[in-house]
Amino acid sequence: MRPSPAVLDAFGADGPLERLRGGHATVWRAGGVVVKRCDVAPAELDWLGTIPGHLRDTARLRLALPRRTADGRLEVEGWIAYPFLPGEPHPDRWADVATATVDFAGALASMDRPAFLDDRTHAWARADRFAWEEDGDPVLLDDPRLRPLVEARRPVHAPSTLVHGDPTGNVLFFDGRPPAIIDPTVYWRPVPFSVAVVAVDAVSFHHAPISLFRTLSDEADFVQCAVRALIFRLATEILIGGGASGSCDRATEEVLRLASARARPSAEPT
């Protein structure tokens, strides 16, 4: 599906129309503007439009925020627009991706929890709530692939704030510029959870070394956040397709080992 000339004109998108990777073939670039089919609820789009504009380009981060039309609209004919931020994902720069996710959370730290989070009903939101024990979905509770992770959960003490819930492929690098964050999908979770999602995705889907679970973060809650990040990814697969692919097996084994080691009481000195 291509955006109409009226959509491009409304968002000030001028130049040859080029289809971009991802987005189910509904993401297009025209000059310095990216247009895509709207895939968020109106309340979420409105909230994204309230993020302060000075966060678009800082010394540590470039952030793709929704672009308004001349008359203030965020959506036209079912399309939304963002500035085009040059860069590419680099699957060998996991530490830099993790740092960018931490910086993203820091940039939004002064913002309150948005109400639209409670209204989400898609699989990712349901999986997130299940991972954090806010929803006891019986189908997920009975799944044998999730049960060991569910039993490994222990309390997380880090405070919740706005984090990017899907940072792995949405951090772009470009020589001489700060990392760019695109497609901000926010959740209200501890910052180590966002970093743990990076680790889970890197090991499970990008063949990163298993040692990433020991080197990517030294936060006290990181291992428990990794337990929840694995539940989040596996539960999403189950809710969308009825089963888990097995991609997370290696990560699950390592995270369960680390969680068990953390839970084991230290030997008393003799």
Image (tube, helix red, strand yellow):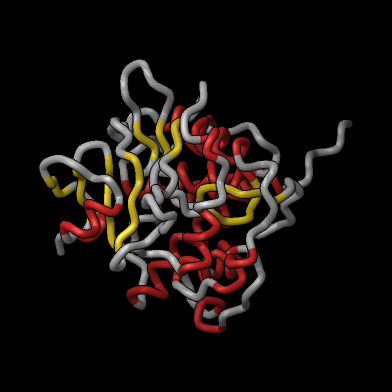
In percent of width and height, residue 186 lies at 53, 54
Compared to 8, does 40 lie above or below? below
In percent of width and height, residue 13 lies at 23, 45
- Quarter of the image containing the C terminus? top right
Q: Horizontally, is 142 left or right of 202 in the view?
A: right
Toward the viewer: 54 or 9?
9
Residue in the picture at 67% in, 57% down: 113
Toward the viewer: 15 or 123?
15
Give the quarter of the image for residue 155: bottom right
Residue in the picture at 46% in, 69% down: 41
Q: How many marks?
A: 0
Q: Horizontally, is 10 left or right of 191 in the view?
A: left
In percent of width and height, residue 100 lies at 49, 33
- Quarter of the image containing the N terminus? bottom left
In percent of width and height, residue 161 lies at 67, 49
The residue most toward the right is: 270
Does residue 25 appear in the picture of this structure?
no
Residue in the picture at 36% in, 16% down: 176
Compared to 235, does 112 lie above or below? above
The residue most toward the bottom is: 138
Does residue 11 appear in the picture of this structure?
yes
Residue in the picture at 39% in, 37% down: 171
Q: Horizontally, is 181 left or right of 213 in the view?
A: left
Toward the viewer: 228 or 82?
82
